[in-house]
Image (cartoon, rainbow, N blue to C red):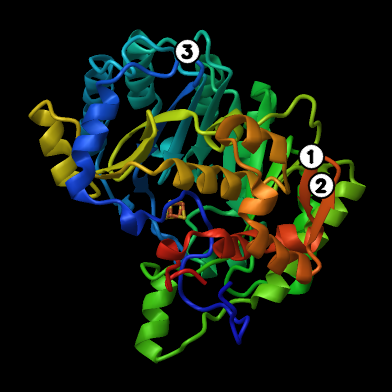
Amino acid sequence: MKTKTSHKTEAGNYFISNYPPYSFWKPEFVDNAVIALNTEPNPSNPLGMYVHIPFCRKRCYFCYFRVYTGVKSDAVKNYADALIQEVKLYRGKKCISDRKPLFIYFGGGTPSFLSTTQLTHLFGEMKSMFPWDDTEEVTFECEPGTLTEKKVKFLKESGVTRLSLGVENLDNELLSVNGRSHTTKEIYRAYEWAKNAEFPQINIDLIAGMLNETESNWQKNIEKIIKMDPDSITIYQMEIPYNTTIYKRMEESGENFAPVADWETKRRWVDYAFNTLSDAGYTVNSAYTVVKDPAKTKFVYRDKLWQGADLVSTGVASFSHVNGTHYQNEHNLVQYQSRLRKNELPIFRALTPTHEELLVREFLLQFKLGSIKPDYFVDKYHVDVRSYFSEPLRTIANLGVLEDINDELRLTRQGLLQVDRLLQGFFLPQHQVDRLV
Ligand code: SF4
């Protein structure tokens, strides 16, 4: 396992969202994606859809996504038409055709950047091709300042089940220092509208360790969140990937470390949040999430995807996983739209993981929930993960963060708080990369 001499926040990716790492996905494997799409699906595997909206009012200084700002309404409409065209092309693919999605996720960027008129058009066309009647969960990410009461009501009436508010922090000064475009007034207003609309679930996203974050401000954030009483709260620890504004500033000033809290401090803040929220009645159900009512509040998207569900993603640079093949769309907007105009799926690079890589992928992703059930891997992969991963498991056991109890391998709280870092030790040797921190 890679060890670090310093725990200050260096530039690099910390969060593990997929496996094998994206740098191993290649244009020369795109034919694999075409074959996967033209093959009958596994009938027991659910289908999910992801819709990527790459527009934002302003680029946050910690943002590492490719986002477009200052985009005019006509360009947004053209993009929505491209998404619709992409969905149409999927209708013609054997692996997708008339399957009904179990879960749908609108992410970004900022999906709520679209106007109600644009959303009406997009949802209507999508539903005419892939009805939402069997869909258990529709998630819609929002930047609070882009919402109106009318838009919130429309989202609820359209079938959105989880409204996810990108709050990040509840201090105006701090929001501004980090380049967020919304204010706390907009957060509270949007939250009130969402509450009144009675969504089955309202989620609030927070980030621990933004620029200028302090112990006392973080604690106040948690107090304020408890008063708001959302159904779930997702907390990420601030990372500084290379394509962020913060990294550019570090490069210009010759700094090796980002001007944000070190990893121990960020973990302590998340631990504080988890403990305080638990005292207030919430339950920790992953390395990033607490929920008020575990029986009612599910994360279908996360849980199914982490068990290998098919995911068809539309939109620029989006990531799919179909019939055992990973692929990503063109990451340039012009290229993405131009290929769709030619009636081509805009797939840019792909990778078909081996059976072993799929096993590692599921193990890594499911460990982010805090525990692994070895029997699941025996049933699905015919592998005893205790012996297959004996070396990295021993390493983390020696750190005192692993408990092997009856039918599960469980991370302690300290293990859970640094799970993305620990998981790098479970990568196959050929996938150990330096750009992870
Ligand atoms: S709102 Fe989200 S996607 Fe948009 S710039 Fe900020 S962090 Fe990036």
At x 26%, y 36%, the residue is: 76
Marks 1 and 2 in Cβ contact (< 8 Å): yes
- The dot on residue 229 is 1
Q: Which callout, 1 or 3, points at the residue further toward the start of the chain?
A: 3
Kind of residue at badge 2: Ile
> Real-space Cα distance between discs 1 and 3?
29 Å
Ligand 1 has an atom within 8 Å of the beta carbon of the residue at disc 2: no
- The dot on residue 132 is 3
> Real-space Cα distance between discs 1 and 2?
5 Å
- 355 over 9 or under it: above or below: above
Whether residue 338 sits left or right of residue 399 in the image: it is left
Kind of residue at badge 1: Asp
Marks 1 and 3 in Cβ contact (< 8 Å): no
- Per the image, label 1 sits on a secondary structure element best described as loop
At x 78%, y 55%, the residue is: 222
- 309 over 141 or under it: above or below: above
Q: Which callout, 2 or 3, points at the residue further toward the start of the chain?
A: 3
Tell me where residue 36 appears, x and y as whole percent. 29, 28
Tell me where residue 201 appears, x and y as whole percent. 67, 29
> Real-space Cα distance between discs 2 and 3?
33 Å
Ligand 1 has an atom within 8 Å of the beta carbon of the residue at disc 1: no
Q: Which quadrant is home to the N terminus?
A: bottom right
- Which-is-in-front pick, marks 2 and 3? 3
At x 52%, y 80%, the residue is: 258
Packing grade of label 3 (10 A; few <14, some 14-19, many >=20) is many
- Per the image, label 2 sits on a secondary structure element best described as helix
Whether residue 258 sits left or right of residue 193 in the image: it is left
